Every structure is written in C-alpha cells, then in structure tokens.
Image (cartoon, rainbow, N blue to C red):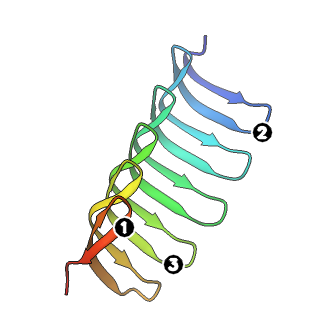
Amino acid sequence: MKHGYGVYHWANNSQYKGNWEKNKICGYGEYKWSDGRVYQGNWNDNNMHGQGTYKWADGRKYEGEYQNDKKHGYGIYEYPDGRCYKGQWANGKQHGVGTFITPSGEQRKGQWENGKRINWLDE
C-alpha cells in the first residue's frame, strides 16, 4: 500500500510524484500525463482538491481552487492567445462574477452562469 511520499509511473508514461495516503493520491503532488498536461497542487482521495496549477501542452493554464477534480472557487484561466478570465468557478465552469481580459489588456467585468456569460456588469 502506497503511503507517504513516492513516485509512480503508469504504463502509458503518465507519472505522479508526491504524497499518498492509504494507497490514494492525497496532499501535495505533481501529476504529468503522457500528452503533456501537468497538474501541481493539492489532492484528496485521488482528486485535484484545493489550490493548484494545471497546464496544457497547447499553452492553456488554470491557477486556482479545485473541488473534487473540478475548478471551483476563485481561479485564473489563461488562453494561449493571451486572453484571460479571472473570477469565480463552480463545478468546472465559469460561474459568478469574473473579469475577462483581452490580449491587449482591455478588461470587462461580467456575470457568468454554468460557463456562459450572462451580462457585462460594467456597462
């Protein structure tokens, strides 16, 4: 049974380096998928849970809170083209108040619901 700090390699070339508790990923660690994705942060019961940073091979990046493997709470999502969303998330989707920033730096505050912008709040 895995318990404490360790490194585990899967047959598909994915790897986890970090803490284990009763054979489950728990505490702080880094998971690297074979397709280039990387998550560094907190885990609970094999799920991303708490603060963390998730990076995709195409340049996307999310830094913020997770709950049971989903973005939840405050987080910053950066797109490869320079766009950015800073705000609230629920169940993996933008939900609540957030600020959208364009590549040129223009900012707009809005209200999101289940991943869709409902309205701009700064009009």
Residue type at the position of mark 3? Gly
Residue at 55% x, 15% y: name it. 3
Pointer 1 residue: 116
CB atoms of marks 1 and 3 within 8 Å? no
User: Alpha-carbon distance for marks 1 and 3?
Assistant: 19 Å
Residue type at the position of mark 1? Lys
Q: Nearer the viewer, mark 1 or mark 2?
A: 1
Residue at 61% x, 66% y: name it. 59
Q: Label 2's element? A: loop
Q: Is residue 72 above or below residue 119?
A: above
Q: Label 3's element? A: loop
What label sits on residue 13 in the rendered view? Answer: 2
Q: Pointer 3: residues within 10 angstroms few (<14), some, or many (20+)? A: few
**Residue 102 locus on image (x, y percent):** 42, 83
Q: Is residue 26 above or below residue 65?
A: above
User: Alpha-carbon distance for marks 2 and 3?
Assistant: 30 Å
Quadrant location of the N terminus in the rendered image? top right
Residue at 42% x, 36% y: name it. 68
**Residue 78 locus on image (x, y percent):** 48, 68
What label sits on residue 82 in the rendered view? Answer: 3
First in sequence: mark 2 or mark 3?
Answer: 2
